[in-house]
Amino acid sequence: MLTALHPLGKLVVCMAWIAAAILVFDARFQLATIVIASLALVVLDRTSPILILALMVPFALFGFGFLTTSVLFRQDSDFALRIAGESVLNSPAFSAGVTLFLRAIACGMVSALFALTTDPGALIRALMAQWRLPPRIGYSLFSAMQLVPDLAAEAQQIRLARAMKRGRPPRRFPGPVELVSLVIPLLAFAIRRAGRAAIAMETRGLAPDAPRTVVSAPRLHGRDLAFIAIAFAALALCISWVRMG
């Protein structure tokens, strides 16, 4: 269900939730954001809970740095201590660390919700059609989207060719030395592709003021408006709940 929604509507909603997670310094709000984003992925998009837990790991490691810094290094400003004192936990240093820890996970889960349920191509077309993204930037993003998988395929081809030359199968994962040796060939491949993309963009006449038609651009439907209204209502309820508590 989330995949079928308009990408710009989801972008506005996710940006609003991330902004609220940054501004509302309360552990309960961060927990509510994590739970709502996780439930939306599991219930509405049928995402595996194991995948969601795996996505939380890098953000939890990032937030753990805030937690240890707040606990081990207690030289905080008066403003930070005053804000942290409003949290549900007693110790100001530990309270601030836990809130920052949960904030990192909350922002990460909202970002993951947008990334897992949004087609990059549809997002770029919507930006070009509705938000007047310049065609040069839009087609540059399309070229980058096509270049990334081609770089991986080119790297694998180079590794296979070198392995055939040595007469032994390639390693499953390249080592540091092999990774360094792949930099120059992949850089040359990227430069050639960039030159071809530039020529293709020029032949398409990507002038900044020329009229242009965007094919297959997503359109706003009633379900998108309902999703935006429900998401902002849930955000308002969470903020009111935190303030009343």
Image: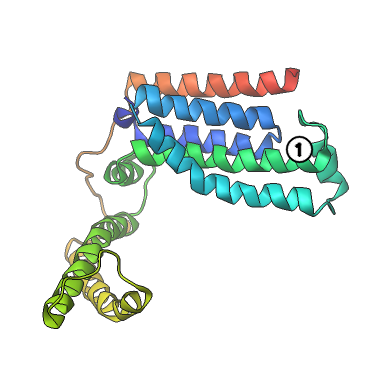
Which corner quadrant of the image does residue 198 belong to?
bottom left
**Residue at 32% in and 41% down:** 126
At x 40%, y 29%, the residue is 41
Location of the N terminus by quadrant is: top left
What's the residue at 17%, 78% (across, down)? 162
- At 68% from the left and 32% from the top, the residue drawn is 27
Residue that label 1 marks: 95
Q: Is residue 85 left or right of residue 68?
A: right
**Location of residue 52 in the rendering, given as x and y in whole percent from the top left corner:** 43, 36
Residue 244 appears in the figure: yes
Which SS class for mark 1?
helix
Indicate whether 171 appears above or below 105. below
Residue nearer the viewer, 77 or 130: 77
Q: Callout 1: few (<14), some (14-19), or many (20+) C-alpha neighbours within 10 Å? A: many
Q: Is residue 197 above or below residue 111?
A: below
Q: Quadrant of residue 159?
A: bottom left
Kindly give the residue lying farthest to the front in the view shown: 168
Q: Amino acid at mark 1?
A: Ser
Residue 8 shows up from this direction: no
Q: Is residue 97 left or right of residue 178?
A: right
- Percent x, y of residue 107: 55, 40
Q: Which of 197/185 is in front? A: 185
Residue 33 place in picture, x, y as percent: 56, 30
Q: Residue furthest right?
A: 78
Which quarter of the rendered picture does the C terminus lie within? top right
